[in-house]
């Protein structure tokens, strides 16, 4: 007899309850943790309990659950499989087959189950004054170390008296009576096992994708046969691990809610509307940029404020959930709350944010950029994209001794650029006169502009790809022309950098500029930008003035290092291209099916498909407004493009998105085919900021 065993007096049988079906994480019991199925961990850890005589799987009959049986047998467990709903019946069958006197219930979603905790619960039972013992009633143990032990007699009475389907599915409520207000209770004698210290805030269970992520970050770092105290020690050494599966459960309520209400039923946005009235009293526009403001959405039928994000999903102030295809205007390239990036931020936070001297990680980040980006021989950091583009213009002027610049895309809010747009209010005429627009993809026009003032231009700046793809040979021509006139060529890679290619569009197109600006996706949402370029031009940084108090802010630098490393390690950009191609094609099929072929389609390469309207059947602004309204109504935050992040790279997300686009298309179809399309708008039409291209 093993020490502590009740053998001889009572046969103690652990029953591991498992099924393949799971609403939130299908097949979770077979998902791998540290390279092995989750349920294998359960069996292997239970084998080290000293008080157990046998270990059984109480599984579900049918082909879908057969692989669970196989894993159980491979782990040396005995197996019974039966009704999915009548779990009590499964426990009774195991008790019959094993001759158990004492049943120890463990669920397969506890892969870190601890043998010493099992022994403690069984040991408490041996005192003989209880029919049901557990550590889950007054919770002190981490969620995921759940053990319930009950007598054969208690099980049999439950089988006879607990007829309610909920009681049969959940096995023990009839025994512990925690739901006695609402459901029958057998009034058993109950004993609790509590730990001296309260660890009930810890979540070690396997219920959702982020739990799996947590377990896969923790378990491989523990020694074989670890005890739960070693898990505690690891978590106190590396507390950021707790963020991986902590916090809110995003979207559940709203997703269910939406399903219940059915498609195309407007959600409520009353809090968004009310909060807008409040915010606009202190914040002009009620937003920090036009692009995130009410002007971009159908106010009254749209979310205006977001409160939470996780992966590719966000929640608005009214509690509505969305798959987010805006991603903060493109910075979020991995997903909200990416554990690698958040971990890096939290670790850095422990050391400090903004220092009085440079921090060593600045060079570590710069070295990554010089390795990855073709033109990057030297690097400086800023906070916004506009910092980097403006620094590039000043450097170009210092390097050439010339003043004029030719611009070919969108380059930020500073005078030298915005003076070339319709929103030039506040920009002095003298500054405006120094910047000239040239038509993208028209190398002849650019050459004519430069030739007319051969010694006048310091810089040509353009977006090498993105909203408009470069025509074959265009970038090469621009390189040749700028070389000929001694002009600094600047690629604005704020969008393309870290999205189109790790080395930017310059890498993909094989044309190397003199300077480049990067930003947006560089740090998965943390504010950082970079100007990179030729060593001789960047050397003029010593002479010009480019300065920012927060330029070396260390949380963003740490986040950028973690982001770039993950982009590289996990081939994120390749995955975004493939996912974008697939999503674009399927979305376009849905649009065509709704009769929008040749009218509306997602166009462009997989890394950044853009919603393109060719022949709007109604006023163009009304048409775009209707689309945004219906995307929102169907759970998508989707504007002019499919901005993708790693968290979108799931078939489930793609399928959900395509279905939502199909429903939105049906609604827009009905609106434009009806007698009064404008009347189908449930709020204020969107307002374009200005046309750049
Ligand atoms: C190509 C390009 N350049 C520059 C900028 C300006 O960046 P920021 O808004 O971070 O100043 C943007 C922003 O959208 C951009 O898309």
Image (tube, rainbow, N blue to C red):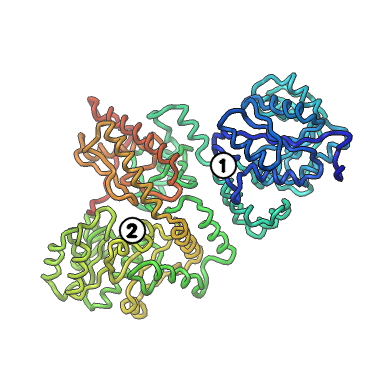
Q: How many marks?
A: 2
Q: Going from the N terminus, do you reach mark 1 or mark 2 first?
A: 1
Quadrant placement of the C terminus: bottom left
Q: For residue 516, which quarter of the picture?
A: bottom left
Q: Is residue 60 visible?
A: yes
Residue 547 is marked as none
Position in image of residue 187 (x %, y %)? 79, 25
Choose between 565 and 288: the one closer to the eye: 565
Question: Marks 1/2: CA distance?
Answer: 33 Å
Instruction: Specify whether 157 is left or right of 457.
Output: right
Q: Residue at x 58, y 40 (%)?
A: 28
Q: Residue at x 61, y 44 (%)?
A: 37
Q: Pointer 2: what residue? A: 496
Position in image of residue 1 (x %, y %)? 87, 42
559 versus 686 height, above or below: below
Position in image of residue 650 (x %, y %)? 45, 44
Choose between 413 and 103: the one closer to the eye: 103
């Amino acid at each position: 007899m093993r020490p502590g065993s009740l053998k001889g007096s009572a046969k103690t049988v652990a029953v591991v309850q498992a099924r393949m079906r799971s609403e939130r994480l299908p097949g979770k019991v077979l998902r791998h943790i540290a390279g092995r199925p989750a349920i294998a961990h359960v069996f292997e850890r239970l084998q080290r309990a000293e008080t157990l005589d046998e270990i059984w799987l109480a599984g579900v009959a049918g082909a879908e659950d057969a692989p669970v049986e196989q894993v159980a047998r491979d782990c040396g467990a005995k197996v019974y499989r039966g009704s999915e709903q009548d779990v009590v019946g499964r426990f009774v069958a195991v008790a019959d087959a094993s001759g158990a006197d004492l049943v120890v219930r463990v669920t397969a979603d506890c892969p870190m189950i601890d043998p010493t905790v099992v022994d403690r619960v069984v040991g408490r039972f041996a005192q003989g004054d209880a029919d049901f013992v557990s550590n889950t009633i007054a919770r002190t143990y981490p969620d995921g170390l759940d053990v319930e032990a009950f007598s054969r007699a208690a099980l049999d009475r439950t089988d006879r008296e607990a007829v309610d389907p909920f009681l049969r599915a959940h096995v023990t409520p009839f025994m512990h009576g925690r739901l006695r207000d609402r459901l029958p209770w057998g009034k058993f004698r109950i004993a609790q096992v509590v730990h001296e210290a309260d660890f009930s805030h810890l979540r070690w269970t396997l219920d959702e994708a982020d739990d799996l992520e947590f377990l896969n970050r923790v378990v491989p770092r523990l020694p074989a046969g670890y005890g739960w105290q070693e898990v505690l020690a690891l978590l106190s050494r590396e507390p950021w691990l707790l963020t991986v599966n902590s916090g809110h459960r995003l979207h559940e309520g709203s997703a269910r809610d939406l399903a219940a209400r059915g498609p195309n039923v407007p959600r409520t946005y009353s809090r968004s509307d009310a909060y807008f009235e409040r915010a606009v009293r202190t914040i002009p526009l009620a937003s920090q940029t036009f692009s995130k403001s009410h002007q971009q959405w159908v106010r009254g039928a749209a979310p205006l404020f977001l409160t939470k994000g996780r992966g590719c999903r966000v929640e608005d102030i009214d509690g509505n959930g969305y798959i987010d295809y805006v991603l903060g205007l493109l910075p979020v390239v991995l997903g909200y709350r990416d554990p690698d990036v958040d971990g890096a931020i939290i670790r850095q936070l422990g050391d400090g944010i903004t220092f009085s001297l440079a921090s060593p990680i600045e060079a570590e980040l710069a070295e990554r950029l010089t390795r990855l980006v073709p033109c990057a021989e030297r690097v400086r950091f800023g906070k916004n994209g506009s910092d980097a583009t403006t620094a590039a213009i000043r450097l170009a002027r210092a390097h050439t001794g010339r003043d004029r610049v030719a611009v070919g895309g969108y380059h930020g809010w500073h005078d030298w650029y915005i003076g070339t747009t319709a929103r030039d209010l506040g920009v002095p005429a003298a500054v405006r006169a120094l910047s000239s627009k040239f038509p993208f993809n028209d190398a002849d026009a650019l050459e004519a502009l430069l030739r007319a003032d051969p010694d006048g231009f310091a810089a040509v700046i353009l977006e090498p790809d993105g909203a408009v793809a470069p025509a074959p040979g265009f970038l090469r021509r621009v390189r040749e022309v700028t070389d000929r006139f001694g002009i600094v060529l600047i690629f604005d890679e704020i969008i393309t950098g870290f999205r189109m290619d790790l080395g930017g569009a310059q890498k993909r197109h094989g044309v190397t500029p003199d300077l480049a600006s990067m930003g947006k996706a560089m740090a998965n949402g943390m504010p950082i930008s970079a100007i990179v370029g030729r060593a001789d031009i960047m050397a003029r940084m010593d002479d010009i003035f480019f300065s920012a108090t927060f330029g070396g802010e260390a949380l963003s630098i740490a986040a950028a290092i973690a982001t770039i490393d993950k982009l590289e390690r996990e081939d994120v950009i390749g995955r975004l291209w493939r996912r974008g191609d697939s999503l674009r094609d399927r979305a376009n099929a849905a649009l065509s099916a709704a009769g929008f072929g040749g009218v509306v389609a997602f166009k462009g390469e997989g890394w950044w498909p853009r919603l393109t309207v060719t022949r709007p059947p109604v006023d163009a602004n009304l048409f775009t407004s209707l689309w945004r309204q219906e995307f929102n109504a169907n759970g998508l935050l989707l504007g002019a493009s499919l901005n993708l992040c790693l968290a979108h790279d799931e078939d489930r997300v793609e399928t959900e998105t395509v279905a939502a686009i199909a429903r939105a298309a049906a609604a827009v179809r009905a609106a434009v085919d009806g007698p009064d399309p404008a009347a189908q708008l449930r709020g204020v039409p969107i307002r374009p900021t200005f046309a750049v291209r």
